[in-house]
Image (tube, grey):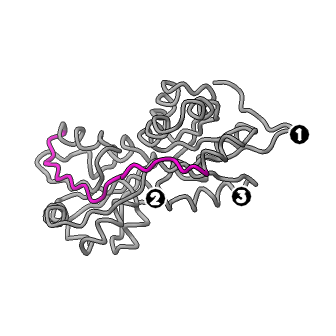
């Protein structure tokens, strides 16, 4: 990997680009501000919770499973908006990361298992999911995203009850955001916790800005995302210890 680009006396400090969903940039903004950096929102989608009879029926069935997995804070919040969440006797709950576990706790579910590695591979290594043959596993998620979990559980012999409790609705880049990106002459930092968000953003940007985006230093939440960013044409990539805003930006400060 190449060296991290530094701001010079004649250039502004790095601009942090957020690929979080619409309205979900606050945590990254706070983390960036703690380093004296500004954040530009480039949301590729908005979160739309589902509220229909089919989803409610599927959720009710999934909530009776032996093990429940929530793949994101949005999944936890969307499920809680549809139905009361609580732990049944003998039931295990798992979350992909601490933010998801916090959302489940806020909804009334305590004792959620969280992996040290906040990704699909990490959650699949949790003790509650290592021996699942013949057991029912409820998966609270959305189309796309962490599609590795269900196939892995099927391969282990689990009966997976997948419920897409929300959807990611694509949104076009804001004209004001595109203008700000064009106007910024300094380095770019791209915290990356979603491969799908990166690809949608590259596809949606005008050609000149897609090329500009590829000059950014990627702060990748996992080895898989490091590889994905490299395949997408990024040359400057740093591996973070996790997907939280603090961990992602720490990959930049550590590299300095």
- Looking at this view, is 157 or 60 the one in front? 60
Residue at the outermost front position: 175
The quarter of the image holding the C terminus is top right
Find numbered disc 1 in the image and state the secondary structure of the residue it sits on. Answer: loop
| Residue position marked by numbered label 3 in the rendering | 34
Estimate the x, y position of residue 162 in percent, counting from the top left: 20, 52
> Residue at (34%, 63%) from the top-left corner?
76
| Residue position marked by numbered label 2 in the rendering | 98
Question: Is residue 164 rendered magenta in the image?
Answer: yes
Estimate the x, y position of residue 198 in percent, counting from the top left: 48, 39
> Residue at (50%, 27%) from the top-left corner?
232
Find numbered disc 2 in the image and state the secondary structure of the residue it sits on. Answer: helix
- Looking at this view, is 128 or 237 the one in front? 237
Q: Are marks 2 and 1 in contact (CB under 8 Å)?
A: no
Find numbered disc 3 in the image and state the secondary structure of the residue it sits on. Answer: loop
Q: Are marks 3 and 2 in contact (CB under 8 Å)?
A: no
Horizontal side, residue 13 vs residue 20: left or right: right
Question: Is residue 74 rendered magenta in the image?
Answer: no
> Residue at (64%, 30%) from the top-left corner?
215
**Which label's residue is closer to the chain start, 3 or 2?**
3
Estimate the x, y position of residue 15 in percent, counting from the top left: 69, 46
The numbered dot on residue 9 is 1
Give the quarter of the image for residue 3: top right
The quarter of the image holding the N terminus is top right
> Residue at (22%, 57%) from the top-left corner?
67
Horizontal side, residue 253 vs residue 100: left or right: right
Give the quarter of the image for residue 114: bottom left
Q: How far is mark 3 from mark 2, CA to CA?
A: 21 Å
Magenta segment range? 156-176
**Which label's residue is closer to the chain start, 2 or 1?**
1
């Amino acid at each position: 990997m190449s060296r991290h680009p530094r701001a010079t006396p004649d250039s502004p400090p790095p601009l942090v680009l957020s690929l979080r969903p619409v309205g979900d940039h606050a945590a990254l903004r706070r983390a960036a501000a703690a380093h004296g950096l500004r954040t530009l929102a480039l949301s590729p989608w908005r979160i739309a919770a589902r509220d229909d009879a089919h989803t409610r029926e599927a959720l009710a069935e999934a909530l009776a499973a032996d093990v429940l997995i929530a793949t994101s804070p949005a999944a936890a919040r969307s499920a809680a908006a549809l139905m009361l969440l609580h732990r049944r006797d003998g039931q295990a709950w798992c979350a992909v990361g601490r933010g998801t576990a916090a959302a489940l706790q806020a909804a009334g579910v305590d004792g959620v298992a969280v992996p040290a590695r906040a990704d699909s591979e990490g959650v699949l290594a949790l003790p509650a999911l290592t021996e699942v043959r013949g057991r029912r596993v409820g998966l609270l998620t959305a189309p796309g995203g962490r599609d590795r979990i269900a196939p892995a559980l099927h391969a282990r012999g689990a009966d997976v009850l997948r419920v897409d409790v929300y959807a990611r609705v694509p949104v076009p880049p804001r004209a004001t955001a595109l203008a700000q990106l064009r106007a910024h002459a300094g380095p770019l930092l791209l915290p990356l916790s979603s491969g799908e968000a990166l690809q949608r953003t590259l596809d949606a940007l005008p050609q000149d800005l897609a090329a500009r985006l590829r000059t950014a230093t990627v702060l990748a939440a996992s080895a898989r995302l490091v590889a994905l960013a490299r395949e997408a044409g990024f040359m400057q990539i740093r591996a973070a210890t996790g997907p939280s805003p603090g961990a992602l930006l720490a990959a930049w400060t550590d590299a300095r």
